[in-house]
Amino acid sequence: MTNKEEGIAHLKEVDGDQTAISLTKEEFVNLMKEGVKIPSHVQIIFSDVEGSVTLETVRDMVIPVMEDMEELSDLPVSDLYDVPLGLLRRDNLRCLGKCRFHRESFRERKYWPEEPRIEPKDVRRIDLCRTMLTPEWIRVAISTLFHEYLHALGFGGHTPMFRSLEALWPDEDANGGYPRKIRSHEHRMAFSEARRETLRWLWDSQGIPFSVWKKT
């Protein structure tokens, strides 16, 4: 067992279930700072998260970890606290998150590697898919906001450089990444399937045939 695997060995099992561990938000953040990998068969139950998850809760579980990443140490990570957060449309189909910039920002600033680089102050708002804001799927919301914060720090497009930074997030099973790689991330794929069923119900309730839904 590696040191990072040992990082979860002492955690409290849920009702004797070895595939589920109980964590507080603070404990989860500390594990992420330590780079502990959560095994794909392990479900995390947040003992201090109930009902709807707020955008601020997600933010406060992402930025402290980013502030601890050596690879981001020369970037204005703490300024991300000032970036407004919002929600995507309820019938949004394709996006999990969207980083929206002020149009005028690109007159003077550019994406990496050009300078001066886009910064958090150039972001108008970051929107997240509301389906993620539940205790069950908060890990996907956290990794998605990390993804969007990388865009806010000036890394545009899903370039190899961007993907290498995205891979820094330790909770790999909930993370994004290259389309081929994401298929091995079980928690992320489970969320995608649950979201698909939710959207199918929403569209069916509006009288839109599933055959049309699949092509949209």
Image (cartoon, rainbow, N blue to C red):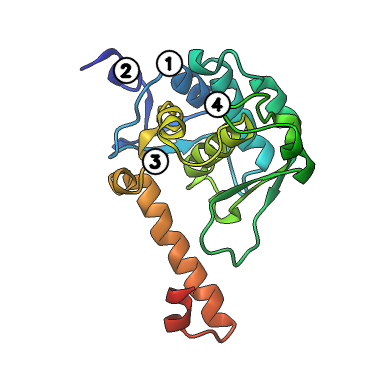
The residues bearing labels 4 and 1 have C-alpha atoms spaced at a distance of 29 Å
Residue, x 30% and y 43% (percent of image)? 181
Q: Which residue is mark 1?
A: 34
The residue labelled by disc 3 is 177
Considering the numbered disc 2 on the image, is that residue within a helix, a strand or a loop? helix
Residue 112 point in image, percent of width and height: 56, 29
Q: Nearer the viewer, residue 160 or 193?
A: 160
What amino acid does circle 2 point to? Lys
The residue under the point 53% across, 84% down is 208
Residue at disc 3, secondary structure: loop
**Residue 31: where, in percent of width, then height?**
44, 21
Q: Which residue is mark 2?
A: 4
Give the spatial CA distance, label 1 vs label 2: 8 Å
Q: Give the residue drawn at x 29%, y 13%.
A: 3
Gap in Å between the C-alphas at discs 2 and 4?
33 Å
Judged by depth in the image, the label closer to the viewer, 3 or 1, is: 3
Q: Nearer the viewer, mark 2 or mark 3?
A: 3
In the rendered structure, are the residues bearing label 1 and label 2 in contact, judged by CB atoms less than 8 Å apart?
yes
Disc 4 residue type (three-letter): Pro
> Which of pointers 2 and 4 lies earlier in the amino acid sequence?
2
Q: Farthest residue to the right: give it.
A: 104
**In front of the other: label 2 or label 4?**
4
Judging by the rendered image, the residue that carries numbered circle 4 is 113
Callout 2–callout 4 Cβ contact below 8 Å? no
Q: Secondary structure at mark 1?
A: loop
Q: CA distance from mark 3 to mark 1?
A: 21 Å
Residue 83 in view of the camera: no
- Image position, residue 167 (x, y; %): 40, 30
Mark 4 falls on what kind of element?
loop
Q: CA distance from mark 2 to mark 3?
A: 21 Å
> Relative to residue 43, is residue 28 depicted above or below?
above
